[in-house]
Image (spheres, rainbow, N blue to C red):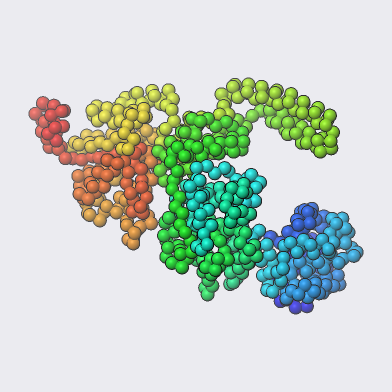
Amino acid sequence: MRYDKFTQKAQEALALAQEILDEYNHQELDTEHIFLALLRQDDGLLGKILKRMDIMPEAVQRRLESTLDVRPKVYGGATAQIYITPRVKNLLTLARSEAQRMKDEYVGCEHIFLAITEEREGDTAKLLREFGINKEKVYQALQTIRGSQRVTDQDAENKYMALERFARDITALAKQGKLDPVIGRDKEIKRVIQVLSRRTKNNPVLIGDAGVGKTAIVEGLAQKIVEKNVPEILKDKRILSLDMGALVAGSKYRGEFEDRLKAVMDEIKKGKGEIILFIDEMHTIVGAGAAEGAIDASNMLKPALARGELQCIGATTLNEYRKYIEKDAALERRFAPVFVSEPSLEDTIEILKGLRKRYESHHGVVIDDSAIEAAVKLSDRYITERFLPDKAIDLIDEACARARIEVYSMPEELKEMERRLEQLGEEGRAAVDRRDYEKAAELRDEADRIQEEYRRKRNEWMKQRGIDDRVTEEDIAQIVSSWTGIPVSRMVESEMDKLLKMEDRIHQRLIDQNDAVTAVSDAIRRSRAGLKDPNRPIGSFIFLGPTGVGKTELAKSLAEFLFDTEEAMVRIDMSEYQEKHTVSRLIGAPPGYVGYEEGGQLTEAVRRRPYRVILLDEFEKAHPDIFNILLQLLDDGRLTDGQGRTVDFKNTIIIMTSNIGSEIITENLKNGSFDYEQVKKDV
């Protein structure tokens, strides 16, 4: 028999059958080995057929493995010789006949399985009878998978149920109640509905920053479709999210990716306009699957979009839209942009209140209103690189997880009571199914009694341990501190004592310089008390004086006081920035220059850890252009780096040191009449 007339998957199954033969130390390749190989195939067709017949593939596989395990084994040199039984030869002949009968050009896994169902004796026949598998049922299941498709090439199995394999049905998830509620995006959803209702170019693309809720808008639309709260033209439509990663994964042969995408598009066409395709991270279609001599996904989608055979919703960020989509004018003109902005603080609070029940039920904790407000305000103030509502939701989620871990490390007695409550619940449901209502009532009464005792003991244990299952403002503040290193949680008594005695702690390392130490200490205390200007750094100081009096040492002492190590300080020697072009070293090179991807020394250090002491040593030696950048930093508390990212300096302490005026200071000291205020004025 010509094996080149078998599909790729069928050839893989026969090769896997030989591996199974070696695994069990058998010498004869039999029908059972091929049957098991079909079951073990990754993403195999047989598993899908059995699931369509309401049969668990794992159960059939276990039964087959136990059958093969008791067969005689051959050890030694004899295992090198493999014999094919007459049953297998007959099986492959029958498979070929099935392919011809179904007018298929290649023998696939389904034809081999149909031939297996013809078995009338032996272990396979017993197993088929045991699970109620027969040829008619297999035909019916195969019809739902294959439809009217025929096997015309060796990759046919990969084209069956292409949408089920490479897409996720968002409307089905909405029907099952598995999607989070979408709050405060009515304007954007209405705009998407308007674009979808157009006669031509009815393909919206959602453009907005990462985390602002582009995917949530599509989920909101799916929920509206399920609720029938959409115009007539969109009723009964299905939104399917295309998984570009799954589509590309494993497509190693030329033309394989195109075949998969074409199969997806063919199924959409068969849907006769009832399917809307959602492509998240839409820029990934440009260049996807484009091996040498092949065309990418965007060029395959263009004709279908132009003819109106495919209706699509895209989602991407503005940078990627500009970089990938705008460059391709033919692709861009098929889509209508819908801009999605970051929600306001008030809207984000409403969004979190809408999601609160989901997170409470998942984590088994209670979220206070104060925690929601703190999550929004603190994330907006301190986590500047990400966007609302995503960063606020992440804060709530992690704070709930932290509280849950503390609550659920409970004694074994309480865990046993939890298990008993679950067991009683299952027994009660079973009793209702049997219509044994008397037993169900008994079980419910017992569950109520145990629940009451469980609550009492759990509350006692939590009170004893000082554990609370409520997520509060303080929990959110602690998570923000762990993410950014910025101390935003409420000051505990030990920290208050530390800040009150700050001057004494610094003077243990630095002798004298009382005025400078007091000025720095006051700035830190103002910041922790929440009295500083929110749009400027914690403090900015110029330390002037001759060499060796302790200017740099004070900066090191401050870093050690705040972070327990003097290494937690960004020290920049400004004598290295005397040339005009050295500005790019601080904030990063502009686009097109060498080192553009690396970022700046100052901006990268603060971007990674926003709570820092920044020491600009001998700043008078720097080029005047550097002072213009520092002016923006001191005035607005932020800098924009070479890549266009805004870096927040509002939680930094900036110290500049210089030798300017050291002659005046030295002269006054020599005269013995050192008037601090007068010297300060003269300098």
State the image coordinates of residue 247 (x, y, percent, origin top left). Answer: 59, 62
Is residue 463 in view? yes
State the image coordinates of residue 129 (x, y, percent, origin top left). Answer: 88, 58
Residue 322's place in the image compared with 149, above or below, is above
Residue 347's place in the image compared with 576, above or below, is above
Question: Which residue in the rendered view is the most extreme toward the left?
Answer: 671
Relative placement, left or right, of 151 versus 514 is right
Name the quarter where the N terminus is drawn: bottom right
Relative placement, left or right, of 621 versus 92 is left
State the image coordinates of residue 614 (x, y, percent, origin top left). Answer: 31, 41
Residue 158's place in the image compared with 580, above or below, is below
Relative placement, left or right, of 194 versus 531 is right
State the image coordinates of residue 321 (x, y, percent, origin top left). Answer: 44, 59
Identify the image quadrant of residue 142.
bottom right
Is residue 38 in view? no
Residue at 53 percent across and 53 percent down: it is 193
Tell how many labels.
0
Residue at 65 percent across and 51 percent down: it is 172
Identify the image quadrant of residue 566.
top left
